[in-house]
Image: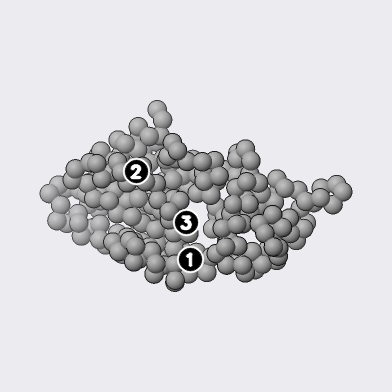
Amino acid sequence: MGFWPIVLNVLRNSDVVLLLVDARMPEISRNSEIISKVEAMRDKRLIIVFNKADLIGQKDTNKLKKEYPNAFFISATKKTGVKDLRAVLENMAEHWDRNSLRIGLVGYPNIGKSTLINLFSASAKAKVSSVAGTTKKTLWVRVGKLRIMDSPGIIPFGDKKVQIGLTAAKDPHKIRNPEKVAIRIIEFLDKKNKNILKEMYGAVGNDAYELFEDIGRKKGFLVKGGEVDENRISIKVIDDWQRGRINLK
């Protein structure tokens, strides 16, 4: 069975849908298809949860809070913001008309869904990995009156290959043209703050490709003749981005 039928089943059987979004790039990782599907269903509540909030600055956080006043901001890896989210869900469960509140957890692959489940319950055994595609089927976890359903990460049909790499929805070693994704990440970071790449890699340059090549030289990623190893640089940049090693603050 494909991922979409599984996730649609999760949506249909949920009272509350938690949509995990990467706080570093909310518009890219927001997954509008899931939002539209939830909004089309009656008696469903959608809660947007921005994960990796520890990797963005206060200015960006304030902007997101203004745009999404009812959203939650967490860091699944740093274990921050999770208690507040859980408290709200437990309060909802106390006033629910059933014995448990059914919560569907959805989002792109590798967005942090399984990690969040494990933080909700010490006894949860959701498999966590930094490689996209770890969750292959629906996983049910009970936490008091909360019944949480994890699901495989979903990539919308219209997503471009570069966007899939940016959202950590695909293992960088399996991306067909990783240099395109790496250049896009470098462009994004350079536009955000020109010091990010200098602090992370010591790289300087007038444009994304110059920065790309300088990262290779600074890291010693060279091939015969002194040319930079584009594939190795690309994998390094994408992997650092996907694993949250690059701080946007």
Which mark is drawn over residue 97?
A: none
Residue under the point 44% across and 50% down: 29
Q: Residue 54's x, y, as percent? A: 47, 65
Does any portion of residue 146 appear in the rendered image? yes
The residue tagged 2 is: 34
Callout 3 secondary element = loop
Label 1, residues with CA under 10 Å away: few <14, some 14-19, many ≥20: some
Q: Residue at x 44, y 71 (%)?
A: 59
Query: What residue would you read off at disc 3?
Result: 25
Which of pointers 1 and 2 lies earlier in the amino acid sequence? 2
Q: In the structure shown, which secondary structural element does the residue marked by tag 1 occupy?
A: loop
Quadrant in which the N terminus is drawn: top left
Marks counted in the figure total: 3
Relative placement, left or right, of 49 versus 227 is left
Q: CA distance from mark 1 to mark 3?
A: 10 Å
> Where's residue 109, x and y in %?
46, 44
**Residue 64 at x, y = what percent?**
38, 64
- Precedes in sequence: disc 1 or disc 3: 3
Tell me which residue sits at (72%, 47%) in the image. Answer: 230
Callout 1–callout 3 Cβ contact below 8 Å: no
Q: Callout 1, which amino acid?
A: Ile
Residue placed at 62% from the left, 50% from the top? 182
What is the quadrant of residue 155 in the picture? Answer: top left
Name the residue beneath numbered marker 1: 56
Q: CA distance from mark 2 to mark 3?
A: 17 Å
Q: Nearer the viewer, residue 224 or 110?
A: 224
